[in-house]
Amino acid sequence: MSKNSPATGKSLSSARERRLQHGRNQRKHLSRNRLADVEPQKRNFDPIRTLLAATEGRVPNLLPLKYQRMAASPFAFFRGAVSIMAADLARTPHTGLMVQLCGDAHLQNLGCFAAPDGRLVFDINDFDETIAGPWEWDVKRMAASIVLAGMEANHTKNACTGAVEEFVASYVSNLEQLGEQPVLVAARHQIHRLRKAEPISAALKQAQRATPLDLLVKYTETGARGQIRFKKIESVLWRLHGAPRQEVLESLPLYRESLPPERLHLFDFFQPLDVAFKVVGTGSVGLRDYVILMEGNGAEDPLFLQIKQEVASAYAPYLKHAPVSHQGQRVVEGQHKIQPISDLLLGWTRIGERDFLVRQLNDHKGRVDIELLRGNGLSSLAVIAGELLARGHARSGDALVIKGYIGSGDKVIKALVQYGVEYAELTQADYEAFQKSLKEEGTKAAA
């Protein structure tokens, strides 16, 4: 029987219908209205204790800096408290429709970076928490982040709610379209209209300026003997010496093994010059993060290689997965599943008993500026966020099955908007409890 025979076409059609029906059947497991459930009164854990428990494996003397950054605003607290939301998501039923989660989906984890061919792209740029999980967990976290980021940008509650609705509607419509496209076309889906959104246009311009030569000015100085080395930047960057420096350099051979041959060939042109410890982000503060300054074709060809400690995803305790052998490899493979392009030198290594992700540091990277989320900036970015998550979920899950569950979209949009708004309110309450806890600890320390 030929591939184009009517019988084959019928079987393909029935297979497609089975996938859609499987999604519809999951509504019996979790009704679409229940996607709105936050139920803070049913919390069976203390959020502050959960936050503190998530610091295992971090550098203790950096934790005060992490908490200081989290104390800046409810949105900053939210970014550093993924462990709390993971526990909240896990205590309510989920759809059971699995994708590769970004895991820490929020507006400031969207940004620009250089593709392997040098083009600047705008996409999700943080995958520390990536893991296979139910699709709606990413959507719920992004929805709450839109409210919190909008409030920080002085939007009204109605404006924040409207932006969340645009985000979820964008996710639903794009997922439906991707589910109907040929599989490989959907996997390569390119997102347009980027430069029309002011926050993204600004991030792209920032990325154009963020070259390795610019980082030389920002992070290095000339030593007494004329050599280029890292300079000390208080609470941000400091040089490593002796055994700690050597341990970082000795991790490079294992990293080389994680690179495909064509990328390994390029990396081997670079030689290490200096090593530093760098404090990064909000949620990542306290994790070990090293930077190696390398040189390729002379002093005008620097490479800043970031070696970032990775620990288990905050969602891992709540999902029944086999143990992960290497957390850096988990992040790399998760990123490849979610997005079609990534850092040219993305890989992993190990230092002692700890796992690390390896990538270029700030090579043509640009981030979203909260100040630019005023006016139409919030809603325009929310629409792009919906498209990015939909593409990632279509690449790593089954868009047709999720489409079957979602149906016309109205119930799901309403429920997820409600969740985002209510979870943002819960985060504000947690933030106030966090601030109170910090003040109490400060009072004890002073006494």
Image (cartoon, rainbow, N blue to C red):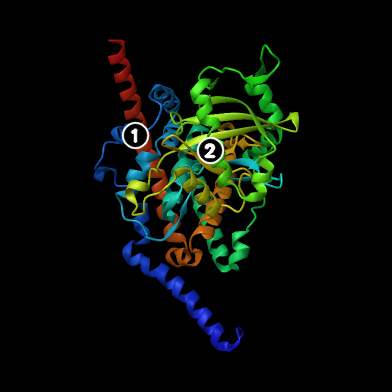
Circle count: 2
Q: Position of residue 145 (x, y in %)?
A: 46, 41
Q: Looking at the image, is 251 positioned above or below residue 411?
A: above
Q: Quadrant of the C terminus?
A: top left
CA neighbours of label 2 inside 10 A, class few (<14), some (14 to 19), many (20+): many
Depth check: 363 or 89 in front?
Answer: 363
User: For the residues marked 2 and 1, what is the alpha-carbon distance in whole angstroms?
Assistant: 20 Å
Q: Position of residue 107 (x, y in %)?
A: 52, 41
Quadrant of residue 41 within the rendered picture: top left
* Disc 2, SS: helix
Quadrant of residue 415 within the rendered picture: bottom left
Depth check: 258 or 358 in front?
Answer: 258
| Residue that appears at 36% across and 44% down | 86
Q: Which mark is residue 51?
A: 1
| Kind of residue at disc 1 | Leu
Residue that badge 2 annotates: 108
